[in-house]
Amino acid sequence: MTPTDSPSAESTPVASRPVASEPVEPGADRPGTSEPGASAAVIELTDVRKIYRSGLFEVAALRGVSLSIQEGEYVAITGPSGSGKSTLMHILGCLDVPTSGLYRLAGEDVGGMSEDQLAEVRNRRIGFVFQQFNLLPSMTAWRNVELPLCYAGGPRSERRQRAVDALADVGLADRVEHRPAELSGGQQQRVAVARALVTNPSLILADEPTGNLDSASTEDVLGLFRRLHDVGRTIVLITHEAEVAAAADRVLQVRDGVVTADSGPAARTARSARKVRA
């Protein structure tokens, strides 16, 4: 059984500085930025459709999804099993491509990219956090966090420092040499979040990130996402749990392959009102 995190081990706030502020490579974009002259949106989908074919049968998983997510937004995508939210997540994460329609990620049209190009985009622009922590048990925390940087190259000492900095930013400065088995469930998910942040991506895409956590660890990880959002990170969280979705500022509901509800305008109005009162 995974131990519950103790408050003293998990209460360190995210630093106000951006995580891994050094670019992955010369000229790499800052989080949420786009090509010169392109839209400021991190995600733009226009009439995206996805059809799966098996012999004579066709299944329309997405039936014309159009949406825009701006830099710095915290968005939850929710829906029942079979609603199309998993297909949408795969497309947002460049793990799959639309059958038709347009998808721009940080200003780049990813629809016509090759597999190698999609892999580069996944490594450079997207930080993934999954329900399964996907940590290598034989590696220490910092070595797990370093893995995305290994694909980009660079000096080993620089990669280690960036991994250590990312762990510090998620409150695990004292756990860098611990292996996954020596960490609680919430701490393992924090390592996974640090790994997602270390490449300085445009987008953090979290797929059911609290699905394997107890209630205390769930609250802790959602608090971490909130603090990351507060320092400007763009977060898209996929979940079937209404209470987890409620942690976001904007909720998109997906059903039968279409977006049936979007709390975006109301959420933005509420945020503006809070800023005026402040």
Image (spheres, rainbow, N blue to C red):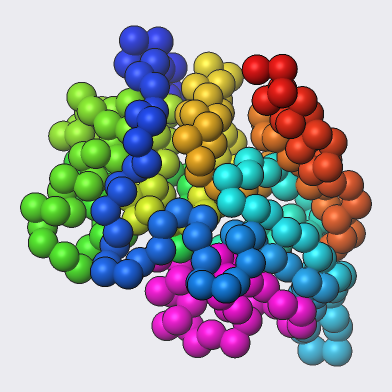
97 in relation to 124, above or below: below
Please provide percent x and percent y for residue 103: 67, 73
Please provide percent x and percent y for residue 91: 64, 68
Nearer to me, 196 or 186? 196
Screen quadrant of the N terminus: top left
Whether the magenta-drawn stretch holds residue 112 is answered as yes
Nearer to me, 209 or 41? 41
Please provide percent x and percent y for residue 188: 37, 34
Q: Is residue 206 visible?
A: no
Is residue 40 found left or right of 232 in the rendered image? right
Please provide percent x and percent y for residue 268: 76, 38
Q: Name the residue at the front extreme.
A: 276
Image-quadrant location for residue 248: top right
Q: Report the residue at 45% width, 63% height from top.
A: 125
Is residue 246 found left or right of 26 in the rendered image? right
Image-quadrant location for residue 240: top right
164 in relation to 55, above or below: above
Q: Report the residue at 90% width, 52% height from top.
A: 260
Q: Report the residue at 80% width, 34% height from top.
A: 269
Q: Report the residue at 77% width, 25% height from top.
A: 273
Screen quadrant of the C terminus: top right
Q: Which residues are magenta?
A: 97-124
Image-quadrant location for residue 123: bottom left
Q: How many marks?
A: 0
Is residue 42 found left or right of 15 in the rendered image? right
Is residue 55 found left or right of 96 in the rendered image? right
Whether the magenta-drawn stretch holds residue 4 is answered as no
Q: Is residue 159 visible?
A: yes
